[in-house]
Amino acid sequence: MAFSAAASAQTGAASAAPGGADTGRPAAVIPLESEPAPKLIAYAPLPDALARGVVIIQHRTENLRILPVFGKEAVAVSPHLGHLHVTVDDWKGTWAHTSADPLILVGLTPGPHKVLLEIADPSHKILGSQTVSFTVPPKKGASEHAH
């Protein structure tokens, strides 16, 4: 009910505007060049999962929405759209992570590792990066594994 009342109030206000010229028009969009630069914030892997050899890296972005959208046309969308390029331990392979869900890595050998996260626009232009370093602990022996 509150939504309907609010919608009715907004509709009434729009139609009451002089000349009704703004009725039905979308809100103005900030030009891309006026928007703040996108920023990536990545966090250290979750310790409980890391102790089991599972790497869960949570991340968030500011001034950019992570979506599976690609191409020149999507670069001009406001607010910014993009995705992450993910590289593990300087491997030659990189993949695109296209959601705000955490990164989950399994099967890494015990020892030190690093994950390079690059924030990219829909044309794959790199806008910033962050490296997350961590150590996967040694696997427990079969005799220590409880069932």
Image (cartoon, grey):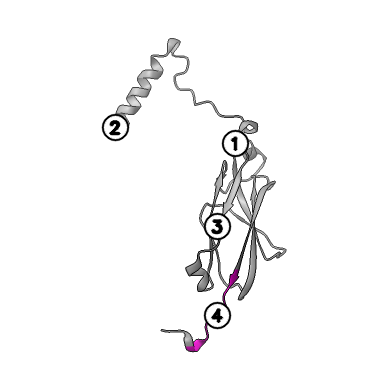
Pick out the residue farthest to the bottom.
143
Separation (CA) of disc 4 from disc 2? 56 Å
Where residue 132 sits, quadrant-wise, is bottom right
Is residue 119 visible in the rendered image? The answer is yes
Q: Is residue 117 left or right of residue 47?
A: right
Report the mark closest to the observer, 2 or 1: 2
Q: Which residue is mark 2?
A: 2
| Residue 134 belongs to magenta span | no
Question: Residue at point 57% right, 29% down?
Answer: 30
Reading the image, the residue beneath label 4 is 139
Give the amino acid at mark 4: Lys
Q: Which residues are magenta?
A: 135-143
Q: For the residue carrying disc 3, how many other residues have a C-alpha within 10 Å: few (<14), some (14-19), or many (20+)?
A: some
Q: Is residue 66 visible?
A: no
Q: Are marks 2 and 1 in contact (CB under 8 Å)?
A: no
The residue tagged 3 is 43
Residue 121 spot, x, y in % from top left = 64, 45
The residue under label 3 is which amino acid type?
A: Tyr
